[in-house]
Amino acid sequence: MMDRDPIELRPGARVWHGFIDRKGQEALVDDIRRVVAAAPLFRPVTARGRPMSVRMTSAGVYGWVSDRSGYRYETRHPEGMAWPAIPDRVLGIWRAVSGVERAPQCCLVNFYDAGAKMGLHQDRDEADFAMPVVSISLGDDALFRIGGTERGGATKSVWLGSGDVAVLSGEARLAYHGIDRIRPGSSTLLPRGGRINLTLRVVD
Ligand code: MD6
Ligand code: FE
């Protein structure tokens, strides 16, 4: 499954390029189609009322939502259903790279179309920052930018391709990071193009 050692972008921030082979990526897309069939993608609105450019849904005990009341974890989709279970194949990737015994409680599914991006942010809505965040990239390449734990510091960028896995842990767990842009048409994995990112977290 894994064909190389990870690249360390900064202490605690690791990327395994090519972690998941094409067959594995296709199987993950099928898993995500089932998640989206049970819990449809929605476009979150920021607390200030601005629609985000990514569409989202979640699997797991908790899903991440954002609306005019702010962002938070919820046990139900905005339409009222419980979130579907995190697919076993996704849990297997967590076990392979997370280095922790606990299972993830949230698998956030982000869908990026050609113009979508994600501003620099910290993942800090979870109770225990000793638990890493694991991210899986599928489909078009994305320019991932990571800085330090303060806003405005130096950043590094790396392209995340389909099948790449990234982990933020230790001193990078609260590092600012985001997606500047995707490279439309760079992958044939998704028939209509775009990018799926899965981020896995222990929440409580
Ligand atoms: C993305 N990723 O790749 C956005 N968060 O689309 C994240 O926000 C992220 O890649 C925490 C850890 C790794 C990540
Ligand atoms: Fe994040």
Image: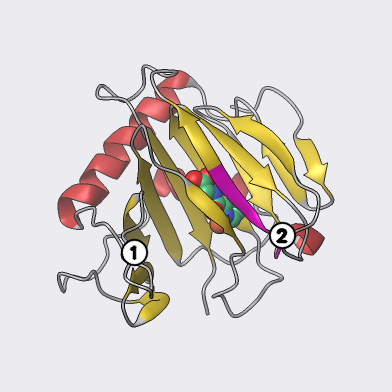
Is residue 167 located in the magenta-colored stretch of the structure? no
Q: Is residue 8 left or right of residue 114?
A: right
Residue 180 vertical position relative to residue 78 in the rendered view, above or below: above
Using the image as rendered, state which of residue 95 and residue 124 is in the foreground. 124
Is residue 18 visible in the rendered image? The answer is yes
* Magenta highlight range: 174-179
Residue depicted at 67% across the width and 33% down the height: 158
Q: Is mark 1 within 8 Å of ligand 1?
A: no
**Of pointers 2 and 1, the one earlier in the residue sequence:** 1
Q: Position of residue 71 (x, y in %)?
A: 41, 75
Q: Is residue 170 left or right of residue 16?
A: right
**In the figure, residue 14 lies in which quadrant?**
top right
Residue depicted at 51% across the width and 73% down the height: 203
Q: Position of residue 90 (x, y in %)?
A: 45, 46
Q: Amino acid at mark 1?
A: Arg
**Residue 50's disc number:** 1
Is residue 176 located in the magenta-colored stretch of the structure? yes
Q: Is residue 180 left or right of residue 132?
A: left
Q: Residues within 10 Å of mark 2 (few under 14, many from 20)?
A: many
Q: Position of residue 125 (x, y in %)?
A: 54, 75
The picture quadrant for ligand 2 comes to bottom right
Residue 120 vertical position relative to residue 78 in the rendered view, above or below: above
For the N terminus, the image quarter is top right
Is residue 94 visible in the rendered image? The answer is no
Residue depicted at 25% across the width and 50% down the height: 35
How far is disc 2 from disc 1 in space, using C-alphas?
Answer: 24 Å
Using the image as rendered, state which of residue 101 and residue 175 is in the foreground. 175
Q: Position of residue 155 (x, y in %)?
A: 76, 46
**Residue 17's disc number:** none
Residue bearing the label numbered 2: 175
Q: Secondary structure at mark 2?
A: loop
Q: Secondary structure at mark 1?
A: loop
